[in-house]
Amino acid sequence: GTVMTQLKVETTEVKTLPTSMGRATSQLYNGKLYMPQDNGNKLEIYDIETDTTEVKTLPNSMGRGTSQLYNGKIYMPQNGGTKLEIYDIATGTTEVKTLPNSMDRLSQLYNGKIYMPQHGGTTLEIYDIATGTTEVKTLPNSMGRGTSQLYNGKIYMPQNGGTKLEIYDIATGTTTTKTLPNSMGRVTSQLYNGKIYMPQNGGTTLEIYDIETDTTEVKTLPNKMERRTSQLY
């Protein structure tokens, strides 16, 4: 008989966005992709169905390294400042709040609050969406934080450029510090089945931290390269 081999064709379609700009964060909502400018004041809204892009102007020219989507609003804390922009998708308007600290921030959304650990310091801001108020906590380590994961009410923050792993318990407001086996850059991570996968930025190491057993398995990746983003499939 004849053996038929079916080839999977991999193709890439290229689109052109209207603005030449940095994009460090994005949100998907109702078939549209919202892309705020990093270090500028533009917001591109790409409509997937119509393949068109609308451009809005945000009130502040600022760094935006992270964002959160909650109840039809996009929360964009400033990297390197004190501003928090809240873009209302339904009305196309932006409200601006002032955060207590001028700093670079990551963010996680949990139970109507945005948790913003400092990149390169010890501060943790907790913004309550319902009340519009911010509580400030102190983390035990002054370190780079380029990525974080939320799991069972705890925020896991691996160090970018070191060996520390901070685990912030939201319920108790306390932080535990673990030691990872490699001193390396970590700017992206993935959570899967209770394990955090941390590929090295600028090297060949992949650490796999098992939350339940508190152990880390180390793999070697084939290429020494920068890894700033990753996807789970």
Image (tube, rainbow, N blue to C red):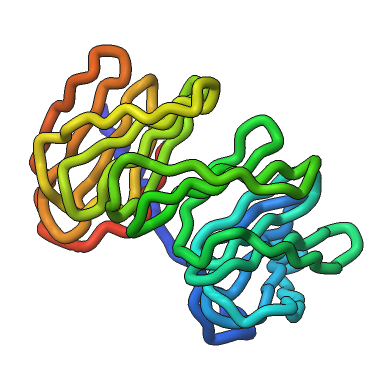
Residue name at image x 47 percent, y 64 percent: 103
Q: Is residue 57 above or below residue 143?
A: below
Front one among 177 and 49? 177
Left or right, 4 with respect to 35, comes to left
Left or right, 189 with respect to 185, comes to right
- Residue 203, position as x, y percentages in the image: 12, 56
User: Is residue 122 visible to the viewer in this orientation of the structure?
Assistant: yes
Residue name at image x 61 percent, y 43 percent: 135
- Residue 131, position as x, y percentages in the image: 79, 43
User: Is residue 55 visible to the viewer in this orientation of the structure?
Assistant: no
Q: Is residue 24 above or below residue 21?
A: above
Residue projecting furthest to the top: 213
Front one among 46 and 92? 92
Residue name at image x 21 percent, y 56 percent: 201
Quarter of the image with the C terminus is top left
Residue name at image x 57 percent, y 80 percent: 16
Left or right, 123 with respect to 49, comes to left
- Residue 187, position as x, y percentages in the image: 31, 54
- The part of the image, by quadrant, that contains residue 96 is bottom right
